[in-house]
Each structure stands twice: as structure tokens, then as C-alpha cells.
Image (spheres, rainbow, N blue to C red):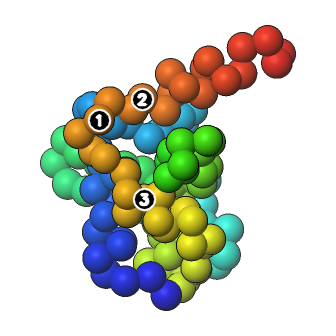
Amino acid sequence: MVSDHLLQRLEAVMLSRDPVDVHINRLRSSRPCALSASCDREMLIGSGKALVHLGASVMWIPARNEAGYWAAPSMVFHYLRDHSYLPPEQFLLAVEAMDLTRRFKAQEVYLKQIVGHF
Ligand SMILES: [Zn+2]
């Protein structure tokens, strides 16, 4: 089980829009929880204008050595908070280390990475 501090940190990373936006391929709908049919269909984090629909995007988090990215569905927040999912430690360290003042637009990085692959 991850600490409350790490959950709050992940929420801050997920809610950031500028200069950091970790979300790629946002959908207008969301995928439900894959672990339990009893979970709510629609899950949100944040408030006001800063809302994230869990299950409606994939996140790219820069690896600490900047050699790549950790990819995770936004639903991972729910898995951590409500299902005691424990992701790889390096993912959690990358979330903890992410600089929210340094520009990082995951969608732009993603689009550059896939050029020539389709
Ligand atoms: Zn669930």
C-alpha cells in the first residue's frame, strides 16, 4: 500500500496542466475499473476546473534517469487508493521526483516517439 503522501503527489502530477501535462490520448469516455465490477463507473479526482476522469487517458511519467518513460493508465490512481495495488518502486520514485515547474507535455513527446511507426 502506498502512503497518503505519495497518493497526494500522484494526484498533483495528474491534475497539473501547465507546464506539466502527463496525459496522452485522452478519451471522451473512460474505461471502468478492471479489478472489480462493484466500483463506480465514473471516477474523478480533483475539483472545479481541475478534474481528471480516471480511465480516460494514459499517463507518461519521465523515468528518473530520463532514459524513458513510465506509462500507466490514469486508473492506476484508483488501483493504488482503493485496491492497494503496488506498482514498481521505480514508477513511484519517478512520480515523487517529477519536477512540476519544468515543462513536460506528454502528448507532444508521445507524438514525436510514434513518428514513422504507422
Ligand atoms: Zn476498482
Report the residue marked by disc 1.
Answer: 102
Residue 30 appearing in the image: no
The mark found on residue 95 in the picture is 3
* Residue at screen point 60% across, 27% down: 110
Disc 2 from disc 3: Cα separation: 15 Å
> Contact (CB < 8 A) between labels 1 and 3?
no
Q: Residues within 10 Å of mark 1 (few under 14, many from 20)?
A: few
Q: Name the N-terminal-most of marks 2 and 3.
A: 3
Question: Of the residues shown, which amino acid type is indicated by label 2?
Answer: Lys
Q: Position of residue 69 (x, y in %)?
A: 59, 44
- Please tell me the numbered disc located at residue 68: none
Q: Alpha carbon of mark 1 to alpha carbon of mark 2: how far?
A: 10 Å
Figure check: 20 above or below 36: above
| Residue 104 coordinates in the image, percent (x, y) | 39, 32
Query: Residue at 36% across / 73% down in the picture?
Result: 6
Residue at left offset 50%, top offset 52%: 64
Q: Amino acid at mark 1?
A: Arg
**Residue 27 falls left or right of residue 53:** right
Q: Which residue corresponds to the image point at 29% horizontal and 76% vertical from the top-left? A: 5
| Above or below for 10 versus 36 | above
Element under disc 3: helix
Q: Is residue 101 above or below residue 8?
A: above
Name the mark nearer the viewer: 1 or 2: 1
- Mark earlier in primary sequence (1, 3): 3
Taking the view exactly as shown, the residue that stands out farthest to the right is 118
Q: Secondary structure at mark 1?
A: loop
Q: Is residue 48 left or right of residue 56?
A: left
Q: Amino acid at mark 3?
A: Val
